[in-house]
Image (spheres, rainbow, N blue to C red):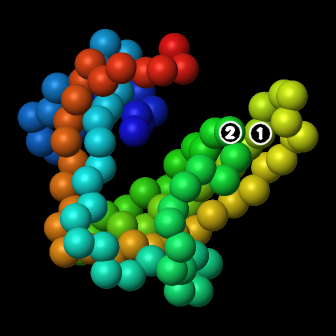
Amino acid sequence: MESAEISEEDLKDKVVLSEHNTLKGKLHLEGVKKILNKDQPFFGVLSMLYDSAEILHLNIINNRVTLSLEWENFPPHPKVIAYSFLEIEADKIWWENIPDLYDPFA
């Protein structure tokens, strides 16, 4: 995951930013207990719905993550824009900061 550009003055904690002044790393969820998609229970495996997803909203409070995703397809696939609204409850949620994480799309 990679954030939008951030000013170091806006950071609450001492975190190393990537070369593009973004937070870059992995969000870990261990012991997932419940997943809701648009407030409905989800029992499948979360996977990519389309070619790309942008996180519009991400909130982590205690043992819950809520996120809103905007999905998009790229040519030659048909043009699609769709949205997901997920709430995930897990035993443990933590951020691994990896400022030099490889970007396969760059």
Kindly identify the residue that appears in the image at 23 percent across and 72 percent down.
31
Q: Count how many numbered circles sit on residues in the image.
A: 2
Vertical position of residue 99 compared to residue 38: above or below: above
> Could you tell me if residue 21 is visible in this image?
no
> Could you tell me if residue 4 is visible in this image?
yes
Q: Earlier in the sequence, mark 2 or mark 1?
A: 2
> What residue occupies the far left of the structure in this picture?
14
Residue 24, position as x, y percentages in the image: 32, 31
Residue 105, position as x, y percentages in the image: 54, 20
Vertical position of residue 40 compared to residue 49: above or below: below
Residue 17, position as x, y percentages in the image: 24, 24
> What residue occupies the far front of the structure in this picture?
44
Q: Which secondary structure lies at badge 2? A: loop
Kindly identify the residue that appears in the image at 86 percent across and 28 percent down.
76
Q: Amino acid at mark 2?
A: Asp
Which image quadrant is residue 68 in?
Answer: bottom right
Q: Which secondary structure lies at badge 1? A: loop
Give the quadrant of the N terminus. top left
> What residue occupies the far right of the structure in this picture?
78
Q: Amino acid at mark 1?
A: Asn
Q: Is residue 19 left or right of residue 51?
A: left
Kindly identify the residue that appears in the image at 27 percent across and 61 percent down.
29
Q: What residue does disc 2 label?
A: 51
5, 35: nearer the viewer: 35
Kindly identify the residue that appears in the image at 53 percent across and 73 percent down.
44
Tag 2 and tag 1, C-beta contact below 8 Å? yes
Q: Is residue 84 left or right of residue 6?
A: right
Question: Badge 2: few (under 14), some or many (20 or more) residues near its Cα, within 10 Å?
Answer: few
Q: Which mark is residue 25?
A: none
Alpha carbon separation for disc pair 2 and 1: 5 Å
Q: What residue does disc 1 label?
A: 73
